[in-house]
Image (tube, rainbow, N blue to C red):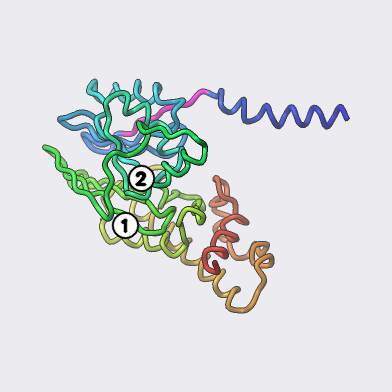
Amino acid sequence: MKKILILVLFLFWIPSNAQKKEVNIQITPLTENIYMLTGRGGNIGVFKNEKGLFIIDDQFANISNKILENLKTISKQPVTMVMNTHFHGDHTGGNENMTKQGATIIAQKNVRLRMESKQKDKGNIIPTSLPVITFEEGLQLYFKNENISAFHVHNAHTDGDTMVYFINGNVLHMGDTFFNGRYPYIDLKSGGSITGYIKASEKALMMINDDTKIIPGHGKLASKKDLEVFLSMLKEITRAVQKEIDAGTSENDIIKNTSLTASYDAKGYGNGYINPEQIRKTIYTSLTK
């Protein structure tokens, strides 16, 4: 009984202790005015412009102050705009804190709908956390030295994904439609699909060149080559799973079949948030639902 109690206390201690760990904010310059910021949650894109700071995603609320302090090393001007790539909390958790600083939140329309619905379920609508400018398919933003193209990709990670391309700087932020070097999390319950996820990478590759710097939703700064490898992984595993489905193999046998992902497991793709069994299950479910 004593051993069980110790185990239970240890399991409660792990997440609590993890929350107390110091968050290390890192800023990587990509061009003269564009940066990538990493901390806890989705990678943040930062664009320094004549009106202030335009950022892409804002991670969790409890590290907003630390993020804002680090942003001051880029510019003393405030955050004036925040683009949310999708609705998940590790990308939108800091929205309310950013609006308190005077920022305007922008997102694809489904992001606002899902955030609002989630807040209603919890019985607490927070208007200041919601996007106030939404768009259907795309949005163009023009600054003195940069043109930005934000465009919706359908049913990929979710049903409200946006990629953001800095045309002059040649930098693409892909949000969670790209997990560099890892198996991706595809939120099937929120409109995501493996087919849409593959199409998102294909669309990105049509826009970029060998010199493009890619900010993934999670993982290290990437290149076109990294995205090509990621897309090949998605297609190869999807073909393998589909072949098993066509052969009449049961769901459980497909999920347990380690050979379907073995070559990429060996490269460490399953060491992130999604493990090999989870990606096999996700792809199977997406192909058969």
Image quadrant holding the C terminus, namely bottom right
Q: Of 287 and 237, which appears nearest the observer?
A: 287
For the image, the number of numbered tags is 2
- Report crowding for label 1: few under 14, some 14 to 19, many 20 or more residues within 10 A (C-alpha): many
SS label for mark 2? loop
Location of residue 242 in the rendering, given as x and y in whole percent from the top left corner: 54, 72
Q: Marks 2 and 1, how far apart in space?
A: 14 Å
- Quadrant hosting residue 104: top left
The label on residue 271 is none
Q: Residue at x 64, y 77 (%)?
A: 248
SS label for mark 1? helix
The label on residue 204 is 1
- Report crowding for label 2: few under 14, some 14 to 19, many 20 or more residues within 10 A (C-alpha): many
Q: Which residues are magenta?
A: 22-28
The residue lying furthest to the bottom in this view is 247
Q: Residue at x 32, y 48 (%)?
A: 108
Q: What is the three-letter code of the residue carrying label 2?
A: Thr
- Quadrant hosting residue 70: top left
Image quadrant holding the N terminus, namely top right
Location of residue 250 in the rendering, given as x and y in whole percent from the top left corner: 67, 71
Location of residue 208 in the rendering, given as x and y in whole percent from the top left corner: 26, 55
From the image, tell me which residue sits under label 2: 85
